[in-house]
Amino acid sequence: MAVALQKRIGQLRKRRARRVRSRILGTAARPRISVFRSNRAISVQFIDDEKGHTLLAFSSKKLPEKEQKQNKTMQAMRVGEEAGKIAKERGIARAVFDRGSYRYHGRVKALAEGIRKAGIHF
C-alpha cells in the first residue's frame, strides 16, 4: 500500500506542476519566479521564458552561516527577502510566482512573503 500511495502522491505533484505552469509565462519585464524546495535548502530563480535565461538565482546555501542555523521557514523568508532585494537592484518590480508542484504553504508561502516584503509585486 505504501508504494501505491507514493505513486499517487507523485502523480498529483506532476499534475499540480503541469496545471500551474500552463497558466504562467515569464518575460524580461515580468519574470517567472521558480521555487525549488529540498529537505535541506530552498532556492529561487527569476526566469525570462522568452529567452530561456535565468536572470537571478538565490539559495539558502548563500545565507550567512548564522542564518543557516535558523529553522527552515525563517530561512525561506530570508531567501525571499534577499532575492527580492537583488531583483529590485536589477530593476525587476513585478513578477509571476511559479510554485511548481509545491502547495502554497509553509516554506513556499514564507518565501513568497519575503519576496513581497522586499517590494516585488505578483
Image (spheres, rainbow, N blue to C red):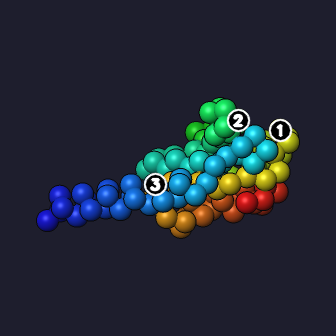
Whether residue 108 appears in this view of the structure is yes
Q: Nearer the viewer, residue 9 or 30?
A: 30
Q: CA distance from mark 3 to mark 2?
A: 23 Å
On the image, the x and y values in percent for residue 32 come to 66, 48
Residue at image coords 62%, 62%: 110
How many numbered marks are there?
A: 3
Front label number (3 vs 2) = 3
Residue at image coords 78%, 59%: 121
Q: Which residue is mark 1?
A: 90
Q: Are marks 3 and 2 in contact (CB under 8 Å)?
A: no
71 relative position to 2: left or right? right
Q: Amino acid at mark 1?
A: Arg
16 relative position to 78: left or right? left
On the image, the x and y values in percent for residue 22 come to 53, 54
Q: CA distance from mark 2 to mark 1?
A: 9 Å
Q: Which residue is mark 3?
A: 18
Q: Earlier in the sequence, mark 1 or mark 3?
A: 3
Quadrant for the N terminus in the image: bottom left
Q: Which mark is residue 55?
A: 2
